[in-house]
Image: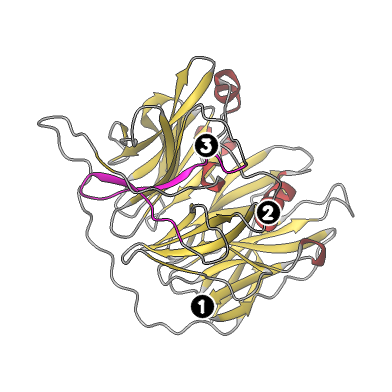
Amino acid sequence: MTWDEDRITLLLREAGDEPPRGPRVDLGDALREGRRRRRRHRGAVAGGVAVAIALAAGATPLFLRPAPPPAPSAVPPPTACAVAPLPLPEGTDGGAVSGGDRTGRWLIGSAARRGSDQQTAVLWHGDRVTELPGALRHGVAAAVNSAGTVVGAADDRAYVVRDGRVDRLPGGDGLRPTAVDDAGRVVGERLQPVGRRVRPVPVLWASATSEPVDLALPGPGWEGTAIGIAGDGTIIGTVSEEGLELTDGYGPNLNRGYRWRPDGTGEFLPMPTTAGNGARGFLPRSVGGNWLLGSTPREQPRALYAPTLLDLRTGDFVAPHTSAEFVPVAVNSRGWTVGSYGQPVAHPTGALLTGSRLLHLPAPEPGVGLRHTVPWVVSDDGRIIAGEQLGDTDADPSAVGRPIRWLCR
């Protein structure tokens, strides 16, 4: 299975025999391979304990409240979209979009080197594509903000790219950035060796030149990672208890949704209550403004994960889907979501959900051995959506995916 097939499988088959459990990573493997952890896709069980972030006496507070972003204007949702492939760097013949900023003008992803398995990290600004410089070229671009600042990791080291220049993020090795906001704050995780395994600890860089600071965990024996920053400066992540084994498939070490507020306190995210469905938690996936898209593991049917939206301002949950065939994967500041529509065997295509209206996104002209279109990015106004058209390696083992973009009106 190729990297793009694995990605679409995770998206479209969120039901399984067992819920995901916290990974136990060998330190040597983690340091050698430098892979991004996928803890944002793990399960969540809610709680309600608040903890304070300890600040060193006399130190500058790290949780300075950023200026609030402007409230989304009453922009009508788009009614039609046109799709086209995004440009690729010379010498590459496929790739994918993996993220973007809130405007949709900046996109990040990867491109496949022609005739090899090598991937190169790329940045799109409108119709212009560039390979990321330095060590990050062969690493993973994790996030980009509206100034075009990119954060990512390569060879177990964290990097930032600004104005075409790549620099190490402070803090040494074993760091993984996952998000950067428009104020330049960066969040992610630090891999801490504990015996024969690695313990992830959520971290915050107050700026690209600041040393990372660990975010407080609920107590001893906990680990976690930060995955995003909300519009009011709240940091969203997941935490879990170490060393606990699953018993009935829903043991206590399932990851729990967590947030660190701008005032320095941390608390578990609330757990949705879905009558008759046995909701067991809430797994954060995507942050857009003050909306959080996640998955709710449910007991009946066993191990089914239902998409759920959380309004971080009110604490209210909203079911964002109109059909069981729509699987949302990203949310914007209006609470609009993009995802894939259709069963895996039916070659699903992209869709945009605005309130209760589902807009099917047109598919590009078929390429050789291409199927499935999956959007991963939606701008705040819904006018720019980006993702990938996946290669059908069953039909053509040499098929590769390609990055695509929808422009909507």
Q: Residue at x 62, y 40 (%)?
A: 248
Residue 124 visible somewhere in the drawing: no
Placement of 219 over or under 359, stated as above or below: above
Magenta stretch: includes residue 131: no
Q: Which residue is mark 3?
A: 136
Q: Secondary structure at mark 3?
A: helix
Q: Nearer the viewer, residue 87 or 268?
A: 268
Pointer 3 local density, CA inside 10 Å: few below 14, some 14–19, many at least 20 = many
| Quarter of the image where the N terminus is located | top right
Residues at circles 2 and 3 in contact by the CB criterion of under 8 Å: no
Left or right: 316 in relation to 109: left
- Mark in front: 2 vs 3: 2
Which segment is the magenta one?
A: 249-272
Q: CA distance from mark 2 to mark 3?
A: 34 Å
Residue 132 place in picture, x, y as percent: 52, 43
Q: Which residue is mark 2?
A: 15
Residue 355 place in picture, x, y as percent: 49, 79
Residue 30 place in picture, x, y as percent: 56, 25
Q: Secondary structure at mark 2?
A: loop
Q: CA distance from mark 1 to mark 2?
A: 25 Å
Q: Secondary structure at mark 1?
A: strand
The disc label shown at residue 137, or none: none
Give the quadrant of residue 83. Answer: bottom right
Q: Compare marks 2 and 3 and give the one earlier in the sequence.
A: 2
Left or right: 401 in relation to 361: right
Q: Which residue is mark 1?
A: 354
